Image (spheres, rainbow, N blue to C red):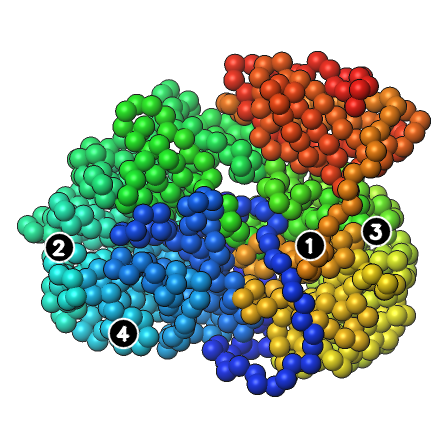
Amino acid sequence: MRRTRILTAVLALTAGLLGGATPALAAAPDDTEVSVAADSYTWKNARIDGGGFVPGIVFNRSEKDLAYARTDIGGAYRWQESTKTWTPLLDHVGWDDWGHTGVASIATDAVDPDRVYAAVGTYTNDWDPGNGAVLRSADRGATWKKTDLPFKLGGNMPGRGMGERLAIDPHDNDVLYLGAPSGKGLWRSTDAGVTWKQVTAFPNPGNYAQDPGDSSGYSSDNQGIAWVTFDESTGTPGSATKTIYVGVADKDNAVYRSTDAGATWQRVPGQPTGYLAHKGVLDAENGYLYLAYSDTGGPYDGGKGRLYRYATKTGQWTDISPVAEADTFFGFSGLSVDRQHPGTVMATAYSSWWPDTQIFRSKDSGGTWTKAWDYTSYPDRENRYTMDVSSSPWLTWGANPAPPEQTPKLGWMTEALEIDPFDSDRMMYGTGATIYGTENLTNWDSGAKFTVKPMVQGLEETAVNDLVSPPSGAPLLSALGDVGGFRHTDLTKVPAMMFTSPNFTTSTSLDFAETKPDVVVRSGNADSGPHVAFSTDNGANWFAGTDPSGVTGGGTVAAAADGSRFVWSPDGTGVRYTTGFGTSWSASSGIPAGAVVESDRVDPKTFYGFKSGKFYVSTDGGATFTASPATGLPGGDSVRFKALPGAKGDIWLAGGEAGGAYGLWHSTDGGTTFKKLANVDEADTIGFGKAAPGASYQTLYTSAKIGGVRGIFRSTDQGATWTRINDDAHQWGWTGAAITGDPRVYGRVYVSTNGRGVVYGDTAGGGTDPGPGPEPTGACAVTYKVTNQWPGGFQADVRLTNTGTATWPNWSLSWAFPDGQKVTAAWNAEYGQSGATVTAKNVGWNATVAPGSSVSFGFTGDWKGSNGRPAAFKLGDRTCAVS
């Protein structure tokens, strides 16, 4: 949602990877025997569904239900119609090739639908040390071959929503074109993507940069060639298409054409100037090239825009913009033609952030337009659509905006919109947080409302900064870029809401009190307000702390083992400590600003820090730190360390950089001395999980290079031996931010990625939680509260309290809705519904409820007409008191 997505990726990578080993793209495989064991794991995502920008959606023009989506940092996906889900296609991209998880363009072959191509590369500046590549697949992305390019590509650069830059000739599918950034021009392959040559006859490599004065090279790069479009009416099967249009990032010369299959090129005469053409979509049946223009490259910015129609036979240009130029405060993009009815055209106001994006639709080739929403009497608005986000309820952002803003929003950064070429009722569009879609789009034309809902399951695109798995409560808490973070009570279900009160644009650090896991702290970046927050119910609800003077970002934060105090190392100022919940902070002494901080998991007054090769220890609750005499530690700041639960002073430290100390170290004396593990080449993360059967020491997990092989590794014998638990098909690019095992399930590990969300793995035969115990008996009380309500939907919280004298080993609560409401999703409980009667049962971790204690769960539901409260609740056969 926010404009900080670039910062998430860059901060993660510069802190964790670019300071480490320099990647060598397309490196030859290592023939050395790998002296580590391997285990068979199953890998899944902890479901969030979406979470990032989807700049491109492409449907195949010859095969129904075949579609692909590209993301800016999280790879590419193929649509699976039978399950209405997306299948990830680039999980094989490894550590050294991490930049190839950014997809600059994707193309699906209409002649041979088994063929698909992806142009990959994340940054064109030195944040990504490797060049781009074109990946080609003959089995719809199941396997890939790669051709390295002599230049970089920018899947996460400004202008990434323009396109598509990669295109396949619809008549001779061995011919492909690729538009390059950075002034590298137009490129062509005549052997199905195996080799590429620059089209030297193409006259204009582009000249537009978002900010030419940007010294980082991010905003100052020439955005280059934006799109390639073939006029299929000018060719025959087996011979190259004659007429090709190319969009260039040049406000005075935005569109070029070849009429001789790419041999020569000319600027299209009469074209508008002063804008960039984000999209060029051709309706060959009617002979129209449609163009969506903006005054900037996007995807965040754009203050003015126009829509034009070019008649390919007569050369006539027509301004078909749905609003006057003076009334635009956005650029146009998201351009699509209904291939079943080519006179139907749609476009988006991609950069309209407030009060919402806008979608435009024309049934007469742009002669007249209607809008997805319009004002009745400002600030009231009437929508042609209804939104159903019950599958991803967090898309409301927990917000309650004033009109004309609504929640959930129709979208933002809406650069990708595509009408299914085989189904006029289906349309999908990408936003900064998800893919939305509809399957009754033509209701728009009849005056009935069409339904917009997330069509994003399986596409996980969050950048993960920190992960914790407490010994009780929810099994997983996450700190994420852009969407803040989530509390997962069920890994297979989408949480109802991200962390709120306060919302962070990006959460940077997360910790819990080891002996009181209900106490949780998080820190993060925010547009305004505090940068630290606390929870006393295991992350279910939060309240803001107070910032000390000078704080500019979240930094890292640590909770004492008993939750009595906290140490915080925020950006912009020095390390601070507090007792209680951060109403005031005092400066820590003896430790430099910017240090990474962690807590001992046994002694509540012991905290640790690391900065620039030195380890620091505090034994007075963070008031004073002393530098450890330990030597030989990594000299840079690309380090992550953790203290082992249950053992005071047992510390593991991972990190380093090429040319210096790099690996995994262990201390058993509180950081006074460290021993480097000789069997670990490089390590970037460290985490702990439940001990293996028969073992007394917790299981270690790391993202590391061991035996010359990069991967995710596990050790059950304190690092003496290691088992690689991922395989070459499951690498997820860069995994250097965080890792943790599960303290309750042996073998389960949670892995951070930079764009593929939270990945978790279970060993073969593992991942089984204990089953329920006997039903509870005794008195009970229930508090029922509707916490959020919108047209047709609502969210409610239920608190169940044991008011009896005996501990419940398990619980099952039932009630009847008075108005026919239906539960659509629940968290912290399993549920079933028969008619009006709902039954909610404990999940594995919250089965036991002691006398005087409570357990809380929540759910989302549908309602019509009324949304009355249930009158009675029963625990088994006992009626509970209700408030």
**618 left or right of 185 in image:** right
Residue beneath label 1, please? Answer: 467
Residue 669, given in percent of the width and then of the height, sits at 90, 70
Mark 3 lies on a secondary structure that is loop
Q: Are marks 3 and 4 in contact (CB under 8 Å)?
A: no
When the figure is inspected, residue 324 is found, relative to residue 867, above or below; the finding is: below
Q: CA gap, disc 4 to disc 2?
A: 23 Å
Crowding near the residue tagged with mark 1, few <14, some 14–19, many ≥20 C-alpha atoms within 10 Å: many
Which residue is at the front of the view, 272 or 541?
541
Mark 2 lies on a secondary structure that is helix
Mark toward the start of the polypeptide (3 vs 4): 4
Q: CA gap, disc 1 to disc 2?
A: 54 Å
User: Which residue type does callout 4 highlight?
Assistant: Asp
Q: Quadrant of the C terminus?
A: top right
Q: Nearer the viewer, mark 3 or mark 4?
A: 4
Residue beneath label 3, please? Answer: 514
Residue beneath label 2, please? Answer: 233
User: Which residue type does callout 2 highlight?
Assistant: Ser
Question: Residue placed at 64% from the left, 56% from the top?
Answer: 760
